[in-house]
C-alpha cells in the first residue's frame, strides 16, 4: 500500500492539446482539428461506453459524448449590451452562437463505436503514457470561433478535462487556454 500511495498509482491525469490547420476553399475554409489526448497519470483511462443525454451534469451547457467537441461563432453585436464578456457557460452578452450546419455536440470517438447486441457503444481506453490523436474536418465561413473539447473518463476525474481554443479565419490559430487535470 505504501508504494501505491508513494507513486500515486491511484491518480488519473490527462492533457488535451489541439492542433488546427486551415486551408482556403473558395469563400470558406477547410478546418482540420487534431485533438491529442495524453494519459500522464499512473492508471488506465477509459471512456464510458455511452453518456445519457438526460444526465444532469449541473450546468446549462452539458457535453453529450465522452470526448465532446463544441464550436461556437463569436459574433459582433450592433446593440449595446451591458456585458461584452463572451462567457461559454453564461453568455449574457449573446456574443456566442451555434455554427449553422454543425451539430451542437460532435463526438471525437466516432472511430471507436461498435455494436454490442442491438446497442451502439464506445470502446476507448488509454494506458499510462499513451497518446492518442483524434481528428475531424469542417468547412467554416470566415469569422471568429471558439471551440471546447471535453474528456469525461469512466474513472470520474473530478470534473473531466477541458481545453478551449480560439480561431480566427483566415488568420492563423492561436491557443488561448489549456487545462490539464491532475
Image: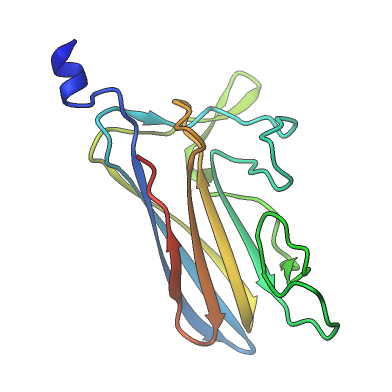
Q: Looking at the picture, does residue 112 appear above or below residue 9? A: below
Q: Looking at the picture, does residue 181 appear above or below residue 95? A: above
Residue 83, image x, y percentages: 75, 72
Q: Residue at x 69, y 62 (%)?
A: 102
In terms of depth relative to the viewer, which is nearer, 167 or 103?
A: 167
In terms of depth relative to the viewer, which is nearer, 6 or 53?
A: 6
Q: Residue at x 45, y 63 (%)?
A: 177
Residue 54 shown left or right of residue 64 in the figure: right
Residue 115, image x, y percentages: 57, 27
Q: Quadrant of residue 44?
A: top left
Q: Looking at the picture, does residue 129 appear above or below residue 5? A: below
Residue 166, image x, y percentages: 52, 71
Residue ranking furthest to the top: 1
Residue 95 shown left or right of residue 4 in the figure: right
Q: Looking at the picture, does residue 118 appear above or below residue 172? A: above
Query: In which quadrant will I find the C terminus?
Result: top left
Amino acid at each position: 500500500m505504501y508504494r501505491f500511495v508513494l507513486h500515486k498509482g491511484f491518480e488519473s491525469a490527462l492533457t488535451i492539446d489541439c492542433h488546427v490547420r486551415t486551408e482556403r476553399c473558395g469563400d470558406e475554409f477547410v478546418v482540420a482539428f487534431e485533438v491529442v489526448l495524453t494519459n500522464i497519470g499512473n492508471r488506465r483511462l477509459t471512456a464510458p461506453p455511452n453518456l445519457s443525454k438526460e444526465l444532469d451534469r449541473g450546468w446549462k451547457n452539458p457535453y453529450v459524448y465522452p470526448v465532446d467537441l463544441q464550436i461556437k461563432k463569436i459574433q459582433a453585436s450592433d446593440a449595446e449590451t451591458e456585458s461584452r464578456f463572451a462567457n461559454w457557460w453564461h453568455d449574457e452578452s449573446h456574443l456566442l452562437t451555434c455554427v449553422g450546419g454543425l451539430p451542437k455536440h460532435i463526438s471525437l470517438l466516432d472511430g471507436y463505436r461498435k455494436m454490442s447486441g442491438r446497442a451502439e457503444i464506445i470502446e476507448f481506453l488509454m494506458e499510462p503514457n499513451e497518446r492518442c490523436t483524434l481528428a475531424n474536418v469542417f468547412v467554416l465561413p470566415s469569422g471568429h470561433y471558439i471551440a471546447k473539447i471535453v474528456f469525461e473518463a469512466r474513472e470520474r476525474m473530478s470534473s473531466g478535462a477541458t481545453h478551449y481554443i480560439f480561431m480566427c479565419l483566415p488568420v492563423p490559430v492561436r491557443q488561448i487556454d489549456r487545462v490539464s487535470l491532475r
